Amino acid sequence: MKNGSSKITPEKKFPRNRLWAIITVYVAFIYLTLPVMRPVLNFLYEALGKEALSVGVNGLLALAIVSFSIYVYKSGFRVYPRLALIFLIMLAGGFVAMGLDIPEERVHFLEYGVLGLLVLKATGVDSIRLVLYSVILVSLIGAVEELIQWSLPNRVGDMRDVLMNVFGGSLGIGVGWLWYGRV
């Protein structure tokens, strides 16, 4: 470094073009697995039962919340107000997700929450405009997923799922905005 500074910026640690490549692979994985997910889910329903699958998905949601809680605790609450708000958003989203009847609907929150977080990190949090672009992009990705499902013979596209995708993605974006932003 010319000026003697050893500070590593986030872009140097993880370039945005690499992050966009990860997002592209993530979305491609979502889209390409759509034709096979119904048989996989049917197998899981038969092998485990709806209740066991439901408990497993709830366990994943709870694990995400507990993991974040442990992180907050280990951080020494250095940025407590921001982390507390993130925790409340995650908790609220988790409770909404756990209240859904069908286990795979709850996966939308995790799936699109992670996508929202990744997209926000890639677009940046420098302005509310970039945050809104992130919401729009994640919403379009979720809508396209449902359009693909609508065209598949063994799947059903549903407006409710689009809304869950948007809600889960928005939760991820909200968490990312609080985490990475200057709120």
Image: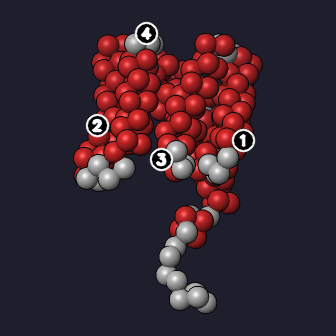
Q: Which residue is mark 4?
A: 101
Give the residue at mark 3.
Answer: 179
33 or 175: nearer the eye?
175
Work out whether 2 lies above or below 31: below
Residue labelled with disc 1: 129
Relative image position of residue 11 (x, y in whole percent): 60, 65
Q: Are marks 3 and 4 in contact (CB under 8 Å)?
A: no
Q: Nearer the viewer, mark 1 or mark 4?
A: 1
Q: In x, y percent, where is residue 53?
A: 35, 20
Q: Secondary structure at mark 1?
A: helix
Q: Is residue 130 visible?
A: yes
Q: Is residue 87 above or below residue 39?
A: below
Q: Position of residue 129 (x, y in %)?
A: 72, 41
Provide the residue designation for mark 2. Answer: 66
Q: Closer to the observer: label 2 or label 3?
A: 3
Identify the amino acid type marked 1: Arg
> Residue flagged by tag 2: what amino acid is it?
Val
Q: Nearer the viewer, mark 3 or mark 4?
A: 3
Real-space CA distance between mark 1 and mark 2, rounded to the nearest whole angstrom: 32 Å
Distance (Cα) linking label 1 and label 3: 17 Å
Give the residue displayed 59% in from the left and 50% down from the top.
121
Query: Of helix, strand and loop, which one carries label 3?
Result: helix
**Cβ atoms at labels 1 and 3 below 8 Å apart:** no
Q: Earlier in the sequence, mark 4 or mark 2?
A: 2
Kindly identify the amino acid type of the residue bearing the numbered disc 3.
Trp
- Under mark 4, the amino acid is Asp
Q: Earlier in the sequence, mark 2 or mark 3?
A: 2
